[in-house]
Image (spheres, rainbow, N blue to C red):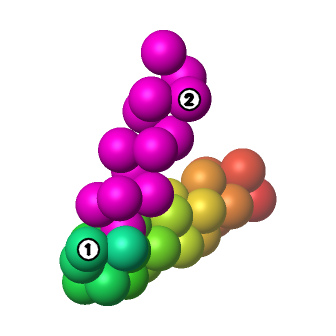
Amino acid sequence: MNDTADLLATFVIKKSPAVKQAFFDDCIFIFLFVSNVSI
């Protein structure tokens, strides 16, 4: 099940760099948000 999800995610990311970029931006935003809340 997990392997299938990983393969699907990899497929989507390879097919669409924009999706990868958006996901990366979201991760940074969440990380900064959590960091600010922690501090």
Element class at badge 1: helix
Q: Is residue 20 above or below residue 36?
A: below
Q: Is residue 26 above or below residue 5?
A: below
According to the image, label 1 marks what residue? 15
Q: Is residue 8 above or below residue 11?
A: above
Residue lying at the far top in this picture: please name it: 1
Q: Give the crowd class for mark 1: few <14, some 14-19, many >=20 residues within 10 Å.
A: few
Of 32 and 38, nearer the camera is: 32
Q: Position of residue 14 (x, y in %)?
A: 37, 73
Residue under the point 47% across and 73% down: 24
Identify the mark nearer the N-term, 1 or 2. Answer: 2
Q: Which three-letter amino acid code belongs to the residue tagged 1?
A: Lys
According to the image, label 2 marks what residue? 3
Q: Quadrant of the C terminus?
A: bottom right
Residue 5 belongs to the span the image colors magenta: yes
Residue 15 belongs to the span the image colors magenta: no
Of 24 and 38, nearer the camera is: 24
The residue segment tinted magenta is 1-13
